[in-house]
Amino acid sequence: MSEFSQHLLQWYSSNKRDLPWRKTTDPYHIVVSEFMLQQTQVSRVIEKYHEFLTQFPTIHSLAAASSADVIKAWSGLGYNRRALLLHRFAQEVVTQYNGIIPRSAVELRLLPGVGAYMAGSIASFAFNLSEPAVDVNVRRIFSRYFTGKDQGAPLGKREEERLFLLVKDHIPQNRSADFHNALMDFASVVCTRDAPKCSSCSMRSFCVFASFYETEKEKVLYVMEKKKEKGVYENGKFVPNRIFRGRIVEFARKNESCRISLAVFGKTIKSDFSISEKEWLIMLCDALQKDHLLTFTVDGVFIILQLFQ
Ligand code: SF4
């Protein structure tokens, strides 16, 4: 086992978080947690994870559900498109694989909602296979430790391939799930994005980044590559469009097949809505319709909308 992995797993053995999806070996439960954890905080996922699995205890029950029921069950998690992708994932696994989730990253990548990271994470967490799951946290830890650079955002194609192989080389035999869980926990507690705890880190003696971070802290330039989100001002405060999209889906969840005036609907979505923002509101609904989250029509000054059935 490499020095890096040894230190990391040592740290993990006394610092691991107690999370429900780490106590199961059911691949379906692990897949549900992975879809939920994309861009949503762990604390919010814990609560919804149990609720969701109570409602859809098996991949067959999820596949057989209506889209509307799955979107409703996703309430509170945000990024509702993931609910539909998970739903389609379940349907394809049931029709193509008789309900048995494939193990190989190559096959997983062909399923809805599964990109490179998700394929690696399902293969690692559900099947303990030595498949790298490289996300912003893994990228940051490896680039700091091995190159001294503070890199979280995706690199160029060739560098990403090199990073993938570097991570693969460090996955200890038969400990892929532990190794990836350790990276996740280490990134959230020690090697954090904004304030890495280098002075107390057990990896510091071998970490390239730590060697200059302590002495030249002020000169270290963090490249925070935040995506510039689209949005509008609400009561003088900038609010990203994804928040408004979330509110529209929430409205549709609570009001099945409803006809409402655009002005009233606008006010429920954005508290200082004015009818001059009608095009913006329709544009948001249009994007949700394209994502198959809801359907809507505009009839003069009214809008009729419902969750996608
Ligand atoms: Fe991260 Fe600092 Fe530890 Fe290196 S020494 S792994 S940069 S926390």
Image (cartoon, rainbow, N blue to C red):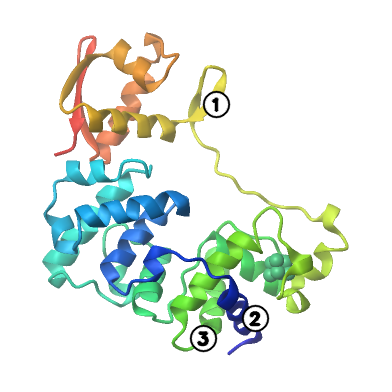
Q: Amino acid at mark 2?
A: His
Which corner quadrant of the figure contains ligand 1? bottom right
Vertical comparison of 43 with 184: above or below: above
Residue 64 is marked as: none
Residue 7 is marked as: 2
Please provide percent x and percent y for residue 6: 61, 84
Q: Quadrant of residue 101?
A: bottom left
Residue 238 is marked as: 1
Mark 1 or 2, closer to the camera: 2
The residue wearing badge 3 is: 172
Q: Earlier in the sequence, mark 3 or mark 1?
A: 3
Q: Is residue 297 left or right of residue 236?
A: left
Comparing 47 with 299, the one in front is 47
Q: Secondary structure at mark 1?
A: strand
Q: CA distance from mark 1 to mark 2?
A: 43 Å
Q: Amino acid at mark 3?
A: Pro
- Residue at the (35%, 57%) spot, across then down: 35
Q: CA distance from mark 2 to mark 3?
A: 12 Å
Whether tag 3 and tag 1 are in contact, CB under 8 A, the answer is: no
Q: Earlier in the sequence, mark 2 or mark 3?
A: 2
Q: Quadrant of residue 276?
A: top left
